[in-house]
Image (tube, grey):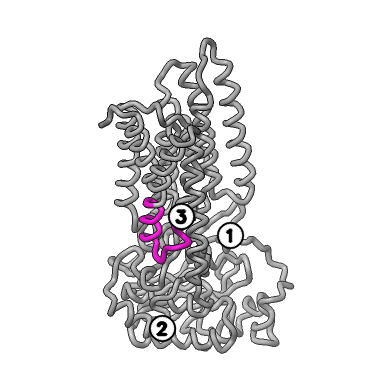
């Protein structure tokens, strides 16, 4: 059976439909990437899956005992809250220091152990968040635009790390991304979202699909078109 | 020992400062200062209600503070205009309260006592209320600490760990109302926010972990409370402002201390 499955999810913000009849299944061990323009409901869908939001319609079913490791889009820690990386990994459940250290080593940021979270760079923070997520030994990693604010080599490294983690641990990965050109190669399956599921399949199938090309253009394999919203779909800002 | 009004005053100030110090950290971390103001100002309206309905002041203040806290809780998370709306609620409640107190027939109460506190007149039963309330606040903060902290760091992370951030927000809001009800006799409605914010801000200059910050805020608050009572006795001034002055002095020292240690403020 699938790890998590959503059936016919609909969600409104201020009376406007952000998601309409979205269904998806995540199988053990696969890497699934959600792509779609701004406001297409990607973050909303993730938040429905981790139950931050309740769908207006539809159901989310999880495999019994499913452990989810969640990496949020950003972590806006108020500068007035003094908290070190070590202490952060204890939130909300304390972990042994050797485990914390091993997780940080795995994500390549062991040297930040005693640094205040507020002093980390964007890339370091993402890796700390990833370390926290893998500490719970998740069956499913959910990442919401994990490489926002990283430069290209940085995000390529990050996606490589995700792929390695999947290969080592066999956990499934569901992530939202803007960086199609990087993500496409690392994904087993791509779901193109724009309020509804426009198309889905292997990266090759999706990048050739008419619906995908309509959303993202063709010439650059979609890499550029994301930043120019010259398509005529409606925009609802659902990422907040 | 409790027969001495100075001892009672010191104990009352101490209990209030400990609860306000610990809760104040969350007020600072979550930027709830305006919430504190609004809840405290509503307390004046509560005083007027209590006089009009001839119920105990404590009941009136607690009821008004909780009502305001729940209203604010309902408003929060509804976008950017909340700040303005809070300002309207906060000062509206204060002004209506001030008018209402003077309109209640036959009342010749000393409004200053509720605006600036009147800790030298606390009775044994006041002490019981203050320490009971402070104990409740500290106990609940202790019990919910990991959950409150996670929800403060990131509501989404909290939710993904099975914690309800809205429930944590509600808890903090109600604790705020509790501190207001406890503190009004000590520092008065106008200075309660100071007692919440200043010790926590002081602690921030020195602390390296959330727990350290809470402990330092409580210690700093306690020091300010006892020092403030002393100062007011020496100079024969109101106690509430004296406590806040000492707290502000400690903040200045901690700021310099943090600066000398080369730490970000």
- Residue B232's tag is none
Q: Is B212 contained in the magenta span?
A: yes
Identity of the residue drawn at 60% across and 51% down: B79
Q: Is residue A1 above or below residue A8?
A: below
Using the rendered image of the protein, determine whether residue B66 is visible from the camera's viewpoint. no
Choose top left, top right, bottom left or bottom right for residue A196.
bottom right
Task: Provide the residue designation for mark 3.
Answer: A54
Q: Chain of mark 3?
A: A
Task: Provide the residue designation for mark 2.
Answer: A111
Please give the range of residues in magenta: B201-219
Residue B243 drawn at (x, y percent)? 46, 42
Identity of the residue drawn at 48% across and 79% down: A124
Q: Looking at the image, which is closer to me, A151 or B254?
A: B254
Q: CA distance from mark 2 to mark 1?
A: 41 Å
Identity of the residue drawn at 59% across and 56% down: A17
Q: Does dot 3 land on a helix, a strand or a loop?
A: loop
Task: Provide the residue designation for mark 1.
Answer: A18
Name the N-terminal-most of marks 3 and 2. Answer: 3
Residue most extreme to the right:
A230
Name the N-terminal-most of marks 2 and 1. Answer: 1
Q: Looking at the image, which is closer to me, B160 or A90?
A: A90
Q: Looking at the image, which is closer to me, B169 or A39?
A: B169
- Quadrant in which the N terminus of chain B appears: top left
In-image side of B212 versus A46 (left or right): left
Q: CA distance from mark 1 to mark 3?
A: 13 Å
């Amino acid at each position: 059976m699938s790890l998590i499955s959503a059936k016919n999810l609909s969600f409104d913000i201020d009376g406007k439909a952000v998601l309409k009849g979205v269904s998806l299944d995540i199988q053990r061990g696969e890497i699934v990437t959600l792509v779609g323009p701004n406001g297409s409901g990607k973050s909303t869908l993730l938040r429905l899956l981790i139950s931050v939001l309740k769908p207006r319609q539809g159901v989310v079913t999880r495999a019994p005992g499913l452990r989810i490791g969640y990496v949020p889009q950003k972590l806006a820690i108020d500068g007035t809250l003094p908290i070190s990386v070590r202490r952060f990994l204890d939130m909300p459940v304390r972990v042994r220091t050797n485990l914390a250290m091993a997780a940080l080593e795995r994500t390549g940021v062991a040297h930040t152990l005693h640094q205040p979270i507020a002093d980390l760079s964007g890339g370091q923070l993402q890796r700390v968040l990833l370390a926290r997520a893998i500490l719970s030994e998740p069956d499913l990693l959910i990442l919401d635009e994990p490489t926002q604010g990283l430069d290209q080599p940085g995000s390529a490294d990050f996606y490589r790390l995700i792929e390695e983690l999947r290969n080592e641990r066999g956990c499934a990965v569901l992530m939202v991304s803007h960086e199609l050109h990087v993500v496409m190669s690392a994904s087993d399956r791509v779901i193109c979202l724009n309020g509804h599921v426009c198309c889905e399949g292997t990266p090759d199938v999706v990048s050739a699909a008419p619906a995908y090309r309509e959303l993202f253009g063709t010439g650059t394999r979609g890499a550029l078109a994301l930043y120019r919203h010259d398509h005529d779909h409606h925009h609802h800002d659902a990422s907040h | 020992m409790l027969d001495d009004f100075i001892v009672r005053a010191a104990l009352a100030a101490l209990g209030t400062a400990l609860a306000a110090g610990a809760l104040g950290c969350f007020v600072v971390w979550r930027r709830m200062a305006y919430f504190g103001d609004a809840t405290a100002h509503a307390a004046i309206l509560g005083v007027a209600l209590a006089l009009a309905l001839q119920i105990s002041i404590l009941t009136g203040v607690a009821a008004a503070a909780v009502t305001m806290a729940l209203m604010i809780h309902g408003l929060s998370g509804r976008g950017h205009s909340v700040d303005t709306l809070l300002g309207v609620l906060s000062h509206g409640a204060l002004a209506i309260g001030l008018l209402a107190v003077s309109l209640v027939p036959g009342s010749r109460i000393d409004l200053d006592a509720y605006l600036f506190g009147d800790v030298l007149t606390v009775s044994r039963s006041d002490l019981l209320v203050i320490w009971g309330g402070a104990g409740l606040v500290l106990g609940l903060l202790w019990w919910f600490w990991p959950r409150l902290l996670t929800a403060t760091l990131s509501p989404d992370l909290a939710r993904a760990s099975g914690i309800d951030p809205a429930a944590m927000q509600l808890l903090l809001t109600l604790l705020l109302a509790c501190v207001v009800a406890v503190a009004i006799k000590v520092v008065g409605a106008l200075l309660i926010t100071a007692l919440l914010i200043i010790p926590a801000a002081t602690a921030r200059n020195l602390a390296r972990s959330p727990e350290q910050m809470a402990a330092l805020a409580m210690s700093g608050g306690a020091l300010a409370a006892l020092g403030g009572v002393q100062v007011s006795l020496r100079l024969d001034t109101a106690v509430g402002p004296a406590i806040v002055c000492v707290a502000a002095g400690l903040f200045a020292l901690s700021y310099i201390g943090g600066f000398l240690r080369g730490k970000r403020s």
